[in-house]
Image (cartoon, rainbow, N blue to C red):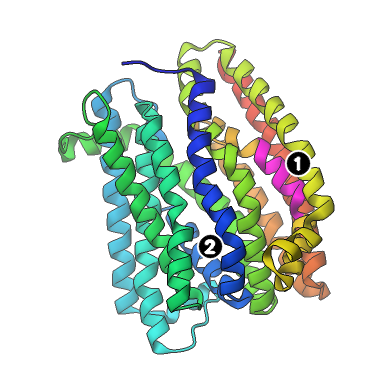
Amino acid sequence: KKKGGFLFYVTLLTGGTVIGQGLFVLISPLLSRLYSPEAFGDWGVFVSTAGLLASVATLRYELAIPLPEKEEDAQALAWVGALVAIGFSVVLFGLSFWIGADYLQLFNIQLANSEQKRLFLLALPFGVGTIGLYQVLVYLLIRYKRYRALAASKVALGGSAVAQLGLGVWQNGGWGLIVGWILGRVVAIGVGLGMERSDEGDKLMPVFPGFQALWRQMRRFIRFPLLSMPAGLMNASAVEMPLLMSASLFDSQVTGWFSFARRVMYAPVNLLGRSVSQVYVGALSEAINRRDRSALRLFDRLSRRLFLLAVIPFTLLALTAPSLFRWVFGPAWYTSGVLVRYLTPLYLVHFVVVPLSQTLNLVERQDWQMAWDFSRLVLVVGVFILAKFLDWDFVRTFAVYSLVSTLMYLAFYVLMRRALIRRVSV
């Protein structure tokens, strides 16, 4: 079976991401005129809540899938992640019907009527479950270098924008955005599995391995739920908390501006970053197993190239964002462009560092990862608490948030490199 090299796989995944994200970029001017900032605020709160819950939905066992030497052990880990994600969604359904909408207040979700509450309570478990299952599929495809299937699933993810556009004609509130987002992930899972079945070789998950095999791998990689899961929860909290806390500090229009700015900024960041990350995980796993300095060379070379690739485009974006947003998306989104200007340093360093972010997990330094995630979460939440105490406006709040997060990502880079040096020097 022919296999390409690192650059070939990055190019393949980037192509899939370009098409998927390109659909969003092309459709965004229509979505911004079809949906109001308040609708984007509702959708942003939903996505942030789903992302926060999904960070624990698989117990982070999917991160261990590339590591076992035996294929049956990797497949058992994939079954573990998938079953735990399904079980977690079932528990959320149970909470929805048992407790009702009361627990949504923890995420500052305010819904206008009982019909919206029922729809949200049904949508959230589906959203969390689809994120968890897709993550399991992603790491399984990475394990077997099925990058064509992974690229196809990325194209399918872009279909969520098409669904949101179609649903917006019927329902231009936040529900069109929410349901379209879920449908995109369901289709991505189906496309990834369908493409994988068309590849040569054995199926990735031919048979259920049995509960004894599942339990054996759960014990073998127990550090992932014990350390990676809390770290992942803190990481997700630090990422999603700004939007959730902005919903409590400011009005829904501000939340919508920030939600839209994040979505637009994630398009160029995800354009290459996630594709590189997924190939990097596979390449670094092999280099670490050899215990030579090629792992460190890969880390340094990749970070340097990512920075050189991003610094000029992000600088131009910072200079032109307000007028660009007003021209492309309409006058209602000028303030989103203002926020992008202040958030650009954060997204630049995010673009460079996040593709490398699984380094500490791969060298099994989850304790360092958890310490960094905890520190970042405390500082990010502290910014918004300080903003409330000092009565800052939303522009100053997000500017300080950007500065603090940028410094934390730089510290994360230093931490990852030091851990990698220690590992390859053993």
Sort mark 1 into few (<14), some (14-19) or many (20+) by Cα contacts within 10 Å.
few
Q: Is residue 112 left or right of residue 267?
A: left
- Mark 1 residue type: Pro
Q: Is residue 54 visible?
A: yes
Confirm or deny contact between disc 1 and disc 2 (CB under 8 A).
no
Q: Whole-percent x and y of residue 6?
A: 51, 21
Judge by depth and name the residue closer to the eye, 183 or 362.
Answer: 183
Q: Which residue is mark 2?
A: 48
Q: Is residue 295 above or below residue 338?
A: above
Judge by depth and name the residue closer to the eye, 104 or 204.
Answer: 204
Q: Which residue is mark 1?
A: 313
Q: Residue at x 17, y 35 (%)?
A: 209
Mark earlier in primary sequence (1, 2): 2
Q: Whole-percent x and y of residue 153?
A: 39, 43
Reply yes or no: does residue 349 show up in magenta. Answer: yes
Q: Which residues are magenta?
A: 343-352
Total labels drawn: 2
Work out which quarter of the rendered image holds the C terminus and state it.
top right
Sort mark 2 into few (<14), some (14-19) or many (20+) by Cα contacts within 10 Å.
many
Q: Is residue 363 visible?
A: no
Q: Whole-percent x and y of residue 306?
A: 68, 31
Q: Quadrant of residue 78?
A: top left
List the single residue furthest toward the bottom: 113
Q: Could you tell me how far apart the alpha carbons at marks 1 and 2 are, in whole angstroms?
A: 27 Å
Secondary structure, mark 2, is helix
- Mark 2 residue type: Ser
